[in-house]
Image (cartoon, coloured by chain):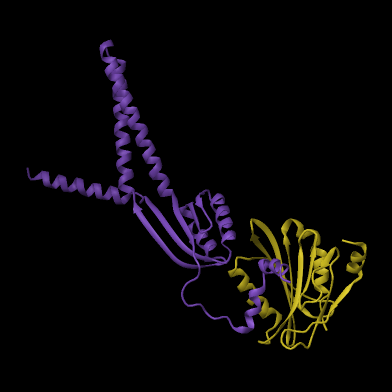
């Protein structure tokens, strides 16, 4: 009888080791607030980056871009965001999905075993039993597909980072530009094109 | 463009006697690039445009900080980068009149189109010569040589 608590403790210990010994699976959500010099160009750069890095754009408008990017390319994304823009704020949120994925995989394994057993039973069944076993096999197959779909969904959440980029105007105290640098405000494509409209 | 205008453009050295920015004491001259038409003669800026929208603009600025061409180029680069411009090339050269010029080329996205934008800065004592060119990338290449020729012709008067 004394051995029972020790066994429970051992099982718990093994479970903890198994949980933390495996690679952590985390879903990451990042939010960036930028003041870009040229928001149109920034959106175009982000669209190009998403495609080149193996991710994709899930939504974009004049003031917002949402994209999915492989976690390994986050460093490059940060560099890209900093080019030609002020980063006003950045937020990162992680959600640990290791337990969830382990649970789903265990359920998948169990259902696969059950399906094998049912198939073996079906092979040796008598005619009046086949309908019932067939119905049971159908139910297990549906559950299996559902589990596979859920695993795929969570795997994607952990492999691709959910990034939202919001464009904002610059807030707060601006450094005043020395008067002798003022002429630079008139440089650029927009100013050149507009200067043809002025009389 | 009329033959008369074209002839003027090819041979023409257009001398702009400018009233400079603050009180006016100096001016500049720049050759008009081939196939360009000057936009407005009576202005303190020199402006010319080609049929496909490629433009060149030049003016004089008072060099209040007494900065060198290289210093101003770095300042302009910082300003333009923060405005979304990507520097694609840069070079230093001497104009035909022997002035030191600092030239930078940028890529810029505007109204869904790719543009080339260049800015060349020349310094002579109290003045900075600023020459800008721009145009859609697909049209700019055809004018690159004649624009560079015009830039190199810039002379302080």
Q: Residue at x 30, y 31 (%)?
A: A111
**Vertical position of residue B126 compared to residue B141: above or below:** below
Count up the numbered dots. Answer: 0
* Front one among A83 and A43: A43
**Vertical position of residue A32 compared to residue A144: above or below:** below
Q: Residue furthest left?
A: A1
Q: Quadrant of residue B82?
A: bottom right
* Quarter of the image where the C terminus of chain A is located: bottom right
* Front one among B62 and A75: B62
* Chain coloured yellow here: B
Give the side of residue A49 with respect to residue A71, left or right. Answer: right
Q: Residue at x 68, y 84 (%)?
A: B67
What x and y, as percent, mark residue B14?
86, 75
Give the side of residue A33 with respect to residue B127, left or right. Answer: left
* Front one among B77 and A130: B77
Q: What hue does chain A carry in this figure?
A: purple
What x and y, as percent, mark residue A6?
13, 47
Q: Quadrant of residue B21?
A: bottom right
Give the side of residue A151 with respect to residue B99, left or right. Answer: left
**Vertical position of residue B1 compared to residue A185: above or below:** above
* Quarter of the image where the N terminus of chain A is located: top left
What x and y, as percent, mark residue A11?
20, 45
Q: Residue furthest top?
A: A127
What x and y, as percent, mark residue A79?
53, 63
């Amino acid at each position: 009888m004394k051995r029972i608590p020790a066994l429970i403790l051992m099982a718990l210990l093994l479970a903890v080791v198994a949980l933390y010994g495996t690679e952590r699976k985390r879903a990451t959500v990042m939010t960036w607030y930028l003041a870009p010099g040229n928001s149109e160009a920034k959106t175009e750069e982000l669209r190009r980056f998403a495609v080149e890095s193996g991710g994709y754009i899930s939504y974009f408008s004049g003031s917002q871009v949402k994209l999915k990017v492989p976690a390994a390319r986050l460093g490059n994304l940060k560099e890209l965001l900093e080019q030609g823009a002020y980063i006003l704020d950045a937020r990162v949120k992680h959600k640990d999905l290791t337990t969830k994925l382990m649970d789903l995989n265990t359920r998948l394994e169990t259902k696969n075993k059950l399906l094998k057993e049912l198939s073996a039973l079906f092979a040796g069944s008598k005619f009046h039993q086949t309908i019932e076993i067939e119905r049971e096999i159908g139910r297990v197959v549906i559950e299996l597909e559902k589990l596979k779909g859920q695993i795929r969904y969570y795997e994607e959440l952990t492999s691709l980072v959910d990034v939202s980029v919001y464009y904002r105007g610059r807030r707060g105290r601006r450094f005043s530009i020395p008067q002798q640098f003022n002429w630079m405000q008139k440089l650029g494509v927009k100013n050149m094109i507009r200067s043809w409209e002025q009389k | 463009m009329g033959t008369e205008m074209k002839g003027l453009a090819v041979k023409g050295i257009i001398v702009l006697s400018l009233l400079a920015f603050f009180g006016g004491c100096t001016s500049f001259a720049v050759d008009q690039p081939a196939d360009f038409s000057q936009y407005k003669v009576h202005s303190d800026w020199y402006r010319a445009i080609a049929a496909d929208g490629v433009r060149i603009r030049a003016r004089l600025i008072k060099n209040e900080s007494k900065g060198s061409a290289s210093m101003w180029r770095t300042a302009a680069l910082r300003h333009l980068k923060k405005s979304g411009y990507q520097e694609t090339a840069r070079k230093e050269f001497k104009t035909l009149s022997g002035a030191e010029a600092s030239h930078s080329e940028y890529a810029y996205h505007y109204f869904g189109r790719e543009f080339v934008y260049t800015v060349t800065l020349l310094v002579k004592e109290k003045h900075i010569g600023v020459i800008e060119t721009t145009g859609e990338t697909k049209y700019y290449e055809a004018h690159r040589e004649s624009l560079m020729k015009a830039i190199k012709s810039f002379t302080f008067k």
